[in-house]
Amino acid sequence: MFGSYTLKRLLLYVSVLVVSGSFCLLVLNLITLSSASNKKGVGISWNQQYHCTDEATLNNVHWWYDWRQSPDQMHLQHHCPTTVRSGYVPMVNGMHFERGINITVPSKYLLGFNEPDHKKHANLTVAQAVIMWKELEKHAAGKTLVGPAVTNLNWLQQFLQQCHQCRVDHVAVHIYKCNTHQIMARLKHLWDMFHKPIWLTEFACPQTTSVNEQLRLMRELLPLLESAPYVFRYAWFVSRRLHHDDGSWVDGSASLMKENSAELSALGHYYNNFMYNWKHSPDRMHLQHHCPTAVRAGFVPMINPKNYNRDINISANAQYLLGFNEPDHHKQSNLTVAQAAGMWKEVEKKAAGKILVSPAVTNLNWLQQFLHHCHNCRVDHVAVHAYRCDAHQLMAYLKDAWNRFHKPIWLTEFACPHTTSVNEQLRFMKEALPLLEAAPYVFRYSWFTSRFIHHNEGTWVDASASLMKEHSAELSVLGHYYNNFMYDWQRSPDQMHLQHRCPVNTRSGYVPMVNGRHFDRVINISSNAQYVLGFNEPDHHEQSNLTVSQAVVMWRELEKHAAGKTLQCHNCTVDHIAVHAYRCNAHQIMTYLNQAWDRFHKPIWLTEFACPHTTLVDAQLRLMREVLPLLESAPYVFRYAWFVSRWLHHNDGAWVDGSASLMKENSAELSTLGHYYNNFMYDWRQSPERMHFFNHCPVNTRAGYVPMVNGRHFERGINISANAQYLLGFNEPDHHEQSNLTVAQAVVMWRELEKHASGKILVSPAVTNLNWLQHFLHQCHNCRVDHVAVHIYRCDAHQIMTKLKQAWDKFHKPIWLTEFACPHTTSVNDQLRFMREVLPLLESAPYVFRYAWFVSRWLHHNDGNWVDGSASLMKENSAELSTLGHYYNNFM
């Protein structure tokens, strides 16, 4: 993941003076799309035309449901992967209630019965629904529970009256009308009746075969649903509908998918890509140029007085709202101060919860008069436009704006006017951007403009300022510089990147340093940095080479630029300390670091270390292997950094030879040393590194790894990564082929284990014999055992659940079932049958905390083990999942 770009830089003005078709890639070219509305959802229909990709194709729809408790059955029926797309909301339909409730898909919400007031659906009397609701509530702990979805509000009113002390957090309704205002009136009536957030879980235009009629309804209604505060969620009916569909009053014209196809219909494209809102968003421009209507993250809406008579309808997602554009200019908004003040009061009503930015002016006197005349008006930030070719004149103008208004400044248009030279624009840009970034009163800035035509109607800004190539979706030279500019120049990797013609985007984790050399240059540290490193080796004549008194004076200046950062002198701020250590002996390095801790008692950054005076890679590797685990386990070492990524073998007499380089010479590949350092994961014994190493795998560990202190080879010591949240105890101490410990031996060893489990949840020894575990817990007085672990090998799911229930009844601690499978069979079908039965039970059992199938990979003729290779989740001699593995991996 690369580092973030400057927060100040924007692309606010997207010119529409383009060739149709070339515009659409522009927004994509200047970063990714934002997410769609949180409100928008869809009902996914499981008819015979369903495609496994239907949910994924509707990728801008935030949530979805299928009128069931889980989509597993449908996925299996259609031979789809069982992975569930995010946003799924389960429903307890009300039909077949006797089959039980088993919610397995994680969700914050649970939908109640589907149309209990309709004879073709749940078809429940109010009395029946009340009884069933009490049962449903037991399964809704921690979820927002949505009431039965009805078409008849009277039924819902009776239900809420008769269901005494029932929990109904939100209400749901279905409305089939072709008139937008009738739909909104009904929703408002529902709100007035119950004052609960509303889910409109089915809506469409009935009794029509016209796609245009559906589209008309959708275009009119979606903005209203988005802006209505009482509408919490809405879902179009339906994803897929057959054109001659069983006489239903909603025709296939409402389908979001094409018939017999995995593609979106025209209606589906509109619904999927709809972004709120229509009037103060880029939607109109996107539609005019036949682009997807998804809006890139960071869009800031503006109130345009030219269209002021239209409704102001601003997306709730917008954090900022820009005021009128150049009211002081006769070709733009062209407003008197009095007109603007009168209109501003209306704008304020739509800006609740947003930062409201003033009208954008070129004439600061106009803005001064506006602020004077607009009594008690809210103006949080101010916006200006400035066209200059001199960066210092530009900054003087902005400083004048700050001195007048003392509000954060948005420079929403700037460029070099009266020139046809791209070089002149580039020179100006290179001078201005660092100054804009460094100025604390400049909040945002935006170049004018993305796209400009070369012979453009006498405009005083020529196309030389365009960030896009003419008749192209590619960035211009100027666009590349603006898009890739990273703040700042001196205390960032930008200079190195530019010198080597690299992209200037910075990888996350970059820590800037104020080196000490060239201190006379401006200190300009990115506000994104969490840490700032101080001078580099001021005690060395070839590096910063500072006296203590020089360093003290310079440090005072450095502190001014480190607000909110951890810095590395009487009353000086020094949060952490940094040292360099060049030794070939790991214990000497640790002794040196320990001395530093004893002297200063501040977290230590070891920012340079390597083995000096050697040309042997093996010597570097030996040091690395010895010292890295020690650095990781030392609590006073906060960060460490090997010296260096790349070093030449015959390098100017430096005492660290190229043997220390992490990169191959004249290559973009890691060296042997680099592979070890990059892939090193702490630690060796209670981690997967040994397995990775012996199998010549990268040693990086996938998230979710839980270490175990096995019990075998306990004398080798315990060295657990501080990152682990859980720690598993001994493996089958009750089995002679595994840990094979007496209870007394285990108790002694557990005392030692506890010392290494600080801050972790400690899981008991994993046993097959619950009596052994009971004796252990009885004899291990005052021992800490947070959870318990068991292994169970049965082919009967109910026998397994019975044994787990016994473990719960005995110990009353959360249970880890860390090994289970069906033994004594060579049949994959037996394993699959067993897995299908037991996984839902394990998921629904509140006392089962974690479970793990045994095992990922098992040989078919495996040394007499009672679990055959049929239980393997991986294919034999392959990196692919087996049939069983696919089911287990995708089970939700």
Image (cartoon, grey):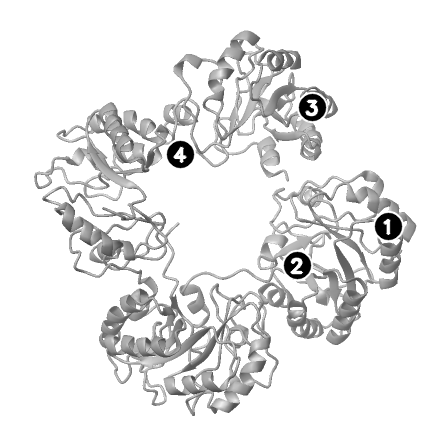
Earlier in the chain: of badge 1 and badge 2, it is: 2
With 45 as the anchor, is 788 left or right in this view?
A: left
The residue sitting at 57% across, 72% down in the picture is: 314
| Name of the residue lying farthest toward the left | 653
Tell me: residue 544, above or below residue 838. below
Q: Is residue 420 above or below residue 762?
A: below
Q: CA distance from mark 2 to mark 4?
A: 38 Å
Check disc 3 and report the residue beneath it.
808
Calculate the distance from the C-alpha at mark 1 to the C-alpha at mark 4: 56 Å
Please identify, in this view, whether the residue under mark 2 or under mark 3 is nearer the observer: 3
- Which amino acid is tagged 3? Trp
Residue 736 shows up from this direction: no
Residue 434 left/right relative to 785? left
**Residue 164 bears which disc, if any?**
1
At x 31% / y 67%, what residue is drawn?
439
Q: Residue 716, how many percent across, how many down?
A: 39, 15
Task: Look at the numbered disc 4 and give the secondary structure of its residue.
Answer: loop
Of callouts 1 and 4, which one flags the residue occurring earlier in the amino acid sequence?
1
Quarter assignment of residue 497: bottom left
Q: Identify the residue at horizontal 60%, vertical 11% (top origin).
A: 779
Location of mark 4 (residue): 700
